[in-house]
Amino acid sequence: MRTTTHARRGRGAGSITALLAAVAVTAACSGGGSGGDGFTTDLQLGTGSTGGVYYPLGQEYAGIFADTIEVEGLNVTAVETGASVENLAKIARGELQLAIAQHNTAQDAVNGRGEFEGATVENVGLLGKLYPEAAQIITLESSGIDSVADLRGKTVAIGPPGGGTREAAEQILAAYGLDKGSYTALEEGFADAKAKLQDGNADASIEILGVPAASLQELHATTGQVKLVPIDGPELDTVVGNSSFEKYEIPAGTYDFLDEPVPTVSVFASMYASTTQVSEELGYELTKAMYERADSLTLAQKELITLEEATVGQGDVPLHPGARKYFAEHGLIG
């Protein structure tokens, strides 16, 4: 039986720092082992905030896993979180067994970089890449904002504490010479950020979202004046050169309001699992269901979830043993 949790476990910047500090202690004490004593079939799947793609995608995958995998006692619960950073930190602490996260954040987690400096995560394994997600800088026509440089002195939603969006937003803004203090930062979930755009309490929102994002289409249906701000020129090269992002173009027609392509950057959303709490057998079944049942998803991103690209963006993150077995069977790895 599958349940989902709507209640947001609120975290400010201070509590994320505390969570990561606890991760460092957990890793030091555990030694990063992957023994079988802690394996469970009661799985919590970390997603993101309700205004993004992770949350509904996690809900749908939780249902697919629970309904199609024949493992005794299996229960999968999708929970709302602050997304990538919080999800991976909670895998390290044993509070989540599955998580959707950006691939660049996972690289930081296993290497102790960025948000994870001094708090290396040693028990996370890749189940596979899901889909590319793009940095979408959202504003309204009435704001008069045409470029990222125009955000100087503005109020900008940069994503909630605990997500990879916040770090990405700061990198993008810094490439345009907008350091902290050059703008008023709102640490908001995607749904709250869009509400503040609508009521005039935010000038722009930087969000890392799958393309297309239904929430943007809904915002346009309500306001009739959504626009996306491009990341281009030498600043685009700066962002790519200083991060794990790749150049990406949101095609014209992706949204009703998008008449021309918009240059930006992208990362990959991937599914990760605990190597200390999810057994090889269950990891195999989860990976199999993730790809072989992707056509059961209702979200547009399902068209981009393919087995052929399952290991793209793996980097230094080890494959979960179950995923390794499944990919070997299908000739993706030796």
Image: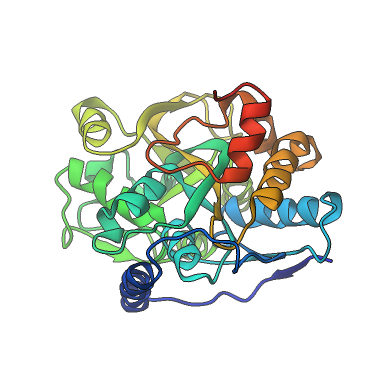
Q: Is residue 239 above or below residue 321?
A: above
Q: In the image, 122: left or right of 219? A: left
Q: Is residue 279 above or below residue 321?
A: below
Viewer-side residue, 281 vs 317: 281
Whole-percent x and y of residue 297?
A: 76, 42
The quarter of the displayed image where residue 156 is located? bottom left
Q: Is residue 183 above or below residue 69?
A: below
Q: In the image, 280: left or right of 88? A: right
Whole-percent x and y of residue 167?
A: 31, 53
Viewer-side residue, 279 vs 50: 279
Viewer-side residue, 39 vs 156: 39
Residue at 32% x, 44% y: name it: 145
Whole-percent x and y of residue 261?
A: 46, 24
Q: Is residue 56 above or below residue 309?
A: below
The quarter of the displayed image where residue 49 is located? bottom right
The quarter of the displayed image where residue 18 is located? bottom left
Residue at 39% x, 53% y: name it: 164
Residue at 36% x, 78% y: name it: 15
Q: In the image, 206: left or right of 235? A: right
Query: Which quadrant: the C terminus?
Result: top right
Residue at 44% x, 50% y: name it: 207
Q: In the image, 194: left or right of 218? A: left
Residue 305 shows up from this direction: no
Viewer-side residue, 2 vs 245: 2
Residue 176 shows up from this direction: yes
For the rendered model, the colour scheme is: rainbow
Number of dots carrying numbers: 0
